[in-house]
Amino acid sequence: MDVSDVSFSSLMLPGQLRGIFMTIGPLDVLDILLVAIIFYKMYEMLEDTRAITIVKGLIVLMVLTMAANLMELHAIYWMLQKFVTLLFVALPIVFQPELRRTLEHLGQGRFFGKSVFLNDEEARSLVKELESAVFRLSKQKIGALIVLEREMGLNDICASGIQIDGLVTADFLMNVFIPNTPLHDGAIVIRGKRLIAAGCLLPLTDNHSLSSELGTRHRAAIGLSEQCDALVVVVSEETGIVSVCEEGRIVRSLDPEQLRSYLRPIFKQESVSIKEIVANWRMKK
């Protein structure tokens, strides 16, 4: 056969691979993109949580299982196969908080969506009031738990406290957390610019590796942040230190500017360019 009869495409791709690409239509491309988006959203929910280490362990086990099968190590393959099967049965228990978070996102129709944001003026005013209240509480060493609702509804948490539904102001928050009052020891829940409920009970974290310096108030804040996407602001009654809890993690000793950087994205949608999105993705890698 003459060399000129061989097409450029046949030199670039083997026959079978070229045949597969020829059978892919627009609907197949859409299908692949949707699956990729779903996996990306799932990765976003697991990223920087304890669950991501379990996922990595499962991937390693699956790779080892396939390698044992290819190398015909029958005993090891049988053992790993049974072990992986048992792990998949246990997944609903291991990933209970993450599964609950995903189902609540789907139930609220917000798996791909965002919360309702305030306008610029309202967002600036609310962040200013919250910042003022938090650091006045910190200066006076008055303990506080402030839950800021995001996409996932917290009606079950609100039901454990006293329903208020008042406009958020610094003076209002100071009055709620006055010591030796019925609402002092509980948490407040803020939705948008309204304080929905006070004196609410939060679930304690099961993380036993936390510092002994963290008391019940901090453990409750971490516990709620493990189960939903809320941001929880904590003011220590003993030291006056301001902390935030998010996705099961706690960041302590915040100054006013650092607190503002956590609060602004909750109430105000920042315009982010594609260039910034790519840069942030590369930094995470």
Image: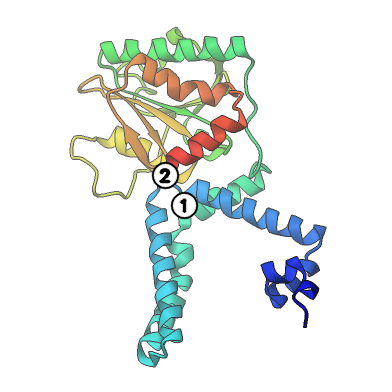
Sooner in the amino-acid sequence: mark 2 or mark 1: 1
| Amino acid type for the residue under numbered disc 1 | Pro
> Residue 79's image quarter?
bottom left
Depth check: give the residue in front, 132 or 174.
Answer: 132
What colouring method underlies this structural image?
Answer: rainbow
Residue matched to label 1: 97
Q: Residues within 10 Å of mark 2 (few under 14, many from 20)?
A: many
Kindly give the residue lying farthest to the left in the view shown: 212
The C terminus lies in quadrant: top left
Residue drawn at (57%, 48%), measured in percent from left and top?
Answer: 41
Q: Is residue 60 above or below residue 284?
A: below
Image position, residue 108 (x, y; %):
66, 43
Depth check: give the residue in front, 175 or 74.
Answer: 74
Secondary structure at badge 2 equals: helix
| Amino acid type for the residue under numbered disc 2 | Glu
- Kindly check if marks 2 and 1 are in contact, taking CB atoms under 8 A apart as contact: yes
Residue matched to label 2: 226
Can the viewer see residue 174? no
Residue drawn at (40%, 10%), measured in percent from left and top?
Answer: 132
Image position, residue 55 (x, y; %):
43, 60
> Residue 36's image quarter?
bottom right
- Give the CA separation, mark 2 to mark 1: 7 Å
Image position, residue 155 (x, y; %):
56, 36
Secondary structure at badge 1 equals: helix
The N terminus lies in quadrant: bottom right
Image position, residue 21 (x, y; %):
74, 67
Q: Is residue 276 above or below residue 263?
A: below
